[in-house]
Amino acid sequence: MIPPDNFLSKSKTLASLGLITLGLSLAPQSAQAVSLIPLTSQDATPGFDDIDFNLLLDKGDFKELFVAEGRIGNNATNGTQELSINRDVRTPIVGGQPVAQGQLSWGKDTLWDFTLAYTGSKVDFSVSRAGGPSVLLSSTEFNKPVNQIYFRTAAQGGNNNFVGLFNLSLNGNSIPDISSLGTPGNRDVDYLAVGDINAPFTLTGKTRFDWGGTRPNNSNLAFQIKVGSRRRVPEPSILGAILTTTIAGSFLGYKKKVASQQA
């Protein structure tokens, strides 16, 4: 038989936890600002790189919805594309393939403005320059929730091949610059990640491509903006409901056990 004082102590503890949990579940959840996500290497190679990002995909810790890409291409308004909106790289059969693409002559060491907007059902990706051309890509293929963005810049080894994203702003929240510099024998890949985002969102910024010597081609100088979602941890309200239910069940179990032992 459970001593009455022991049972009372357990009951008070459970009741206190229940009240705390109930308060947590009922407390209003304030909107959070965009947050930077710390990125650490998952293997023996220092720094977060493509291998580490692919591990996130493999483990299901991040899932791409779409990717906005700018690359050097052939730096012309004909031939291969310089801009695209791509599918999730892990989509069967057509993984990573463009759903919209365009051509642009970036020039050398020229600053361009870009905007990426997602309403929850439509993606708009535009690049423009004052007094210069403007390219707008759009797609209505994507309509799922998102909560994270991974920025990637990559520069193949060469004579100071450079690509960068600057003056980044996501719904009015400033984001640090990101850039890569390829030097002889050294391919540079850099990542930056932000979380606590929702659709609709608007991302604005500037980009610049530069090189010394022979211009690189295709994706040897490129940036990607990978929009998707991480594996979610239950919200406090959901955790509160689960814990409250567990406590209620435990309390009922104690009560039944005491009643049967006293009978």
Image (tube, rainbow, N blue to C red):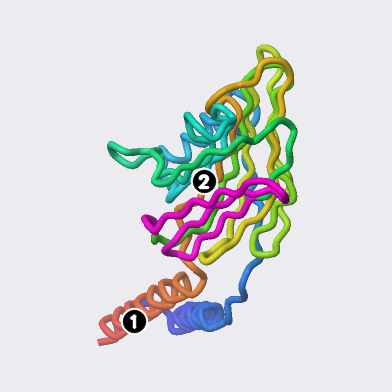
Q: Which residue is mark 2?
A: 68
Dot 2: element: strand
Most foreground residue, 160 or 247 = 160
- How many marks the image carries: the answer is 2
- Choose between 218 and 192: the one closer to the eye: 218
- Residue 131 is one of the magenta-drawn residues: yes
Q: Is residue 153 above or below residue 213?
A: below
Q: Position of residue 88 (x, y in %)?
A: 40, 44
Label 2 vs label 1: CA separation? 54 Å
Q: Which residue is mark 1?
A: 252
Instruction: Find the magenta span and give its range.
Output: 114-142
Left or right: 7 in relation to 262: right
Whether residue 96 appears in this view of the structure is: yes
**Magenta-span inclusion, residue 228:** no
Q: Position of residue 42 (x, y in %)?
A: 55, 32
Q: Amino acid at mark 2?
A: Ala
Tell me: 220 left or right of 251.
right
